[in-house]
């Protein structure tokens, strides 16, 4: 038992290290990273790779970082450490040959990076919004606005506090911080607001807008901008959720019918509505109330399913996410079995399955009751709990080991027959067959998956040989016994010992190993 516990802890530690470790290769680009600046340890030999880079000094964010670092003269082909700084998109990128690497030219690209923190000197226009990437790391900054912004067609939302997609210079005139002549203005970043009002000021009309994750103002002394209420649309990307591992918020009533999108299930992308995700996850009702959410690292995939009258959307990799438990749920995996360490000591649990698990190479053994080394999701399809096209959540009940497991054809899947096994699982607590099966059940006794049969054979062979040997010895001993009884000489033969009884085979040593 101690060995099992040690193995589980070791596997958990290894899994945790693998989850948080970042491996940089010659093809890693800045688009794959969430942080605005981050260190990179480049491997040796990236100069000889053929991955294209675009730019010179400032590179498109899909250019390989390590080749760009060699091109920029930061490291040699021997590798080394560099600091990477994400930058706003540039209108053009010039291709040059430097340090034996030729970069390519390109026109406008939406994101870039460099190896210095200096923000490229791109002009501020009447249309420049506060969500421009050059302001991401700044809480307060000063810009110079051009003249004539009153006639700009750029939109703004709010009054005094403006939504982050509002044009800064137009908002500054609306607020009275500038005139139409332009000039310098100081901008203060603020948290996202539940809503933004429309007000006409200084010949500029602002529009009404709902929640955005951040906002800005031209005054530093605004009262209560960090206080609730929180809106249904608030996301974990909101600027007030930037430093702690978890946050307590109070969701308003009526978020069930809000049209905000959420991505994932159990673990949600950080731009999903927190309150709607909480209802989807079952920790909150439409009446609202207090919840705790936990910031998590990005997941490679997010499953979209319907739960509690809310449909979430599926998505692939996303750089950051959140959940309502301290440990984020692992992404759905068609090969996960009930023997996974995450289910250690659980008597029942729910598990999310992604679509397409019917094509998984993982085996399943049994019908209604399955061996614990069977794929949970594939068994869920076989049992009729979910479909291959949609996936979804299944509730798993841990069951004791059975003496045999029937192999059947169900729902276009074939399960295997199996002999005795240490533990099992089913999708009903009392192991009843109440699944919604779409095809007729047909037993397949000829398909036997019993790894113990070979071990039984190995034990039977030596037992038979020992019996034959014992019979041979007994026959040889019988005439000698007759001879000694008629002889005057007392021959002291040692007693014949029979073989010791074999210990009963442990049917479950495969599991223990």
Image: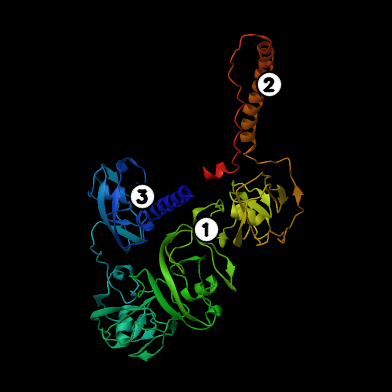
Residue on which disc 3 sits: 23
User: Which residue is found at the position 66% from the left and 50% from the top?
Assistant: 402
Q: Kindly check if marks 2 and 3 are in contact, taking CB atoms under 8 A apart as contact.
A: no
Instruction: Specify which label sits upstream in the sequence, 2 or 3.
Output: 3
Residue 34 seen by the camera: yes
Q: CA distance from mark 2 to mark 1?
A: 51 Å
Residue 211 seen by the camera: no
Q: Position of residue 357 (x, y in %)?
A: 60, 53
Residue on which disc 1 sits: 345
Residue 489's place in the image compared with 15, above or below, is above
> What number is the disc on residue 471?
2
Q: Judge depth for marks 3 and 1 and give the one in front.
A: 1
Residue 343's place in the image compared with 134, above or below, is above
Farthest residue in the front direction?
Answer: 488
Q: Position of residue 379 (x, y in %)?
A: 64, 54
Q: Quick one: label 1, few (<14), some, or many (20+) residues within 10 Å?
A: few
Instruction: Specify which label sits upstream in the sequence, 2 or 1.
Output: 1
Q: Nearer the viewer, residue 365 or 504?
A: 504
Q: Is residue 97 left or right of residue 51?
A: left
Q: Judge depth for marks 2 and 3 and give the one in front.
A: 2
- Mark 1 secondary-structure assignment: loop
Residue 404's place in the image compared with 244, above or below, is above
Q: Position of residue 406 (x, y in %)?
A: 71, 48
């Amino acid at each position: 038992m101690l060995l099992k516990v040690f193995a589980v802890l070791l596997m958990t530690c290894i899994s945790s290290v693998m989850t948080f470790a970042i491996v940089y290769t010659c093809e890693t680009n800045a688009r794959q990273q969430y942080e605005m600046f981050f260190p990179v340890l480049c491997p040796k030999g990236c100069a000889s790779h053929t991955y294209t880079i675009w730019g010179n000094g400032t590179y498109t964010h899909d250019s390989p970082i390590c080749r760009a670092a060699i091109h920029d003269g930061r490291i040699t082909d021997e590798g080394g450490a560099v600091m990477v700084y994400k930058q706003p998109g540039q209108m053009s990128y010039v291709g040059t040959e430097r340090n034996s690497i030729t970069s390519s030219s390109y026109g406008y690209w939406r994101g870039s990076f460099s190896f210095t923190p200096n923000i490229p000197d791109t002009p501020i226009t009447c249309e420049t919004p506060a969500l421009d990437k050059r302001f991401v790391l700044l809480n307060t900054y000063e810009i110079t606005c051009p003249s004539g912004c009153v006639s700009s067609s750029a939109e703004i939302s709010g009054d005094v506090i403006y939504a982050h997609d509002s044009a800064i210079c137009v908002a500054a005139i609306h607020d009275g911080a500038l005139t139409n002549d332009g000039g310098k203005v100081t901008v203060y970043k603020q948290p996202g607001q539940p809503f933004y009002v429309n007000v006409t000021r200084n010949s500029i009309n602002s529009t009404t807008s709902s929640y955005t994750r951040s906002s800005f103002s031209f005054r530093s002394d605004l009262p209560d901008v960090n206080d609730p209420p929180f809106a249904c649309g608030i996301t974990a990307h909101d600027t007030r959720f930037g430093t702690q591992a978890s946050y307590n918020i109070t969701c308003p009533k009526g978020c069930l019918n809000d049209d905000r999108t959420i991505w994932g299930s159990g673990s949600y992308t950080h731009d999903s509505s927190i309150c709607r995700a909480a209802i989807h996850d079952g920790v909150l009702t439409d009446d609202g109330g207090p919840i705790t959410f936990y910031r998590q690292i990005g997941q490679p995939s997010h499953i979209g399913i319907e739960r509690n009258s809310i449909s979430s959307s599926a998505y692939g990799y996303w750089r950051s996410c959140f959940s309502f438990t301290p440990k984020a749920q692992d992404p759905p995996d068609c090969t996960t079995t009930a023997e996974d360490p995450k289910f250690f000591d659980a008597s029942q649990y729910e598990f999310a399955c992604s679509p397409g698990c019917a094509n998984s190479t993982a085996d399943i053994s049994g019908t209604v009751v399955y061996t614990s080394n069977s794929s949970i999701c594939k068994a869920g399809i076989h049992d009729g709990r979910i479909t291959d096209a949609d996936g979804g959540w299944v509730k798993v009940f841990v069951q004791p080991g059975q003496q045999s497991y029937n192999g059947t054809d169900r729902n276009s899947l074939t399960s295997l027959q199996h002999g005795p096994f240490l533990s099992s699982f089913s999708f009903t607590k009392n192991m009843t067959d109440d699944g919604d099966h779409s095809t007729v059940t047909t037993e397949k006794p000829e398909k036997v998956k019993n790894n113990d049969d070979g071990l039984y054979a190995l034990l039977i062979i030596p037992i038979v040989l020992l019996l034959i040997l014992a019979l041979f010895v007994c026959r040889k001993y019988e005439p000698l016994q007759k001879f000694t009884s008629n002889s005057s000489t007392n021959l002291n033969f040692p007693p014949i010992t029979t073989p010791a009884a074999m210990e009963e085979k442990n049917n479950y040593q495969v599991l223990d190993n």
